[in-house]
Every structure is written in C-alpha cells, then in structure tokens.
Image: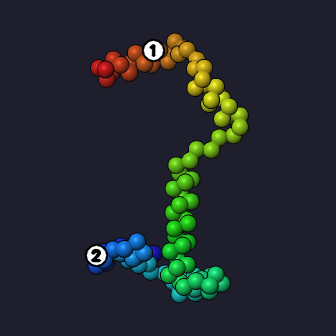
Amino acid sequence: MQLKVRDMPAKSTAKTRDERLEARVSRDQKALFQRAAELQGRTLTDFVIASVHDAAVRVIEETQTIRLSAADSRAFAEALIDPREPNARLKAAAQRYLKLTGA
C-alpha cells in the first residue's frame, strides 16, 4: 500500500480539507471498505477518514499511556511518598557514572 500526502491550494477554513491522502488498495479491499461504508450510511471517503482517525488516536493513546494494576499503582505511589535510601550498589554505580561523564 502506498500513501502520499499532497498539498492542496491554500484555501483554509475550519471545515476545509487542505491535504490529500492517496492509497493503493486491492479490488477486494476496496469492495470491503465500500460495503462497510454503506452499512454505516457513509461515503467511502468519510468511512476511511473516520477509521484511520480512530486507529491513529488509539495507537497514540496506547503508546503514551502507562497502565498499572492496582498493586503496581499502590507500589509506585508509595515509592514516591516514601522513597528508599540508595543501597551500596546504587551509590557505587552513581559514582562510576559521575567519574565516566565528568559531571
């Protein structure tokens, strides 16, 4: 599948679509997308735009959101509220880092 974004003439309003997105799909894919669009009472373009938009939002949310179990959330909050003192190994690692980086 090839995607291309092309600039359209600069005529910009809130509802004006200024960019063009092209995709090469198989005949079967297009028929599938068209059927789904018809079932939702949408044009093929509206269906594709809404589907791609929903997928993009979902991917961004999944990659930018950290989900913790209740136990993990509690442990994280407790570590923030009452952090442990660094042990000897961590202190030694910090010293090595400072020595290597010259910080």
Residue placed under numbered mark 2 in the picture: 10
Vertical order, 83 against 25 (above or below): above
Q: Residue at x 65, y 40 (%)?
A: 68
- First in sequence: mark 2 or mark 1? 2
Q: Is residue 72 visible?
A: yes
Q: How many marks?
A: 2
Q: Is residue 68 left or right of residue 65?
A: right
Mark 2 residue element: loop
Image quadrant containing the C terminus:
top left
Residue placed under numbered mark 1 in the picture: 92
Residue sticking out furthest to the right: 70
Q: Amino acid at mark 2?
A: Ala
Q: Residues within 10 Å of mark 1 (few under 14, many from 20)?
A: few
Q: Quadrant of residue 9?
A: bottom left
Q: Quadrant of residue 30?
A: bottom right
Counting from the top left corner in percent of width and height, residue 24 is at 44, 80
Counting from the top left corner in percent of width and height, residue 88 is at 52, 12
Counting from the top left corner in percent of width and height, residue 99 is at 33, 17
Mark 1 residue element: helix
Q: Residue at x 45, y 75 (%)?
A: 1
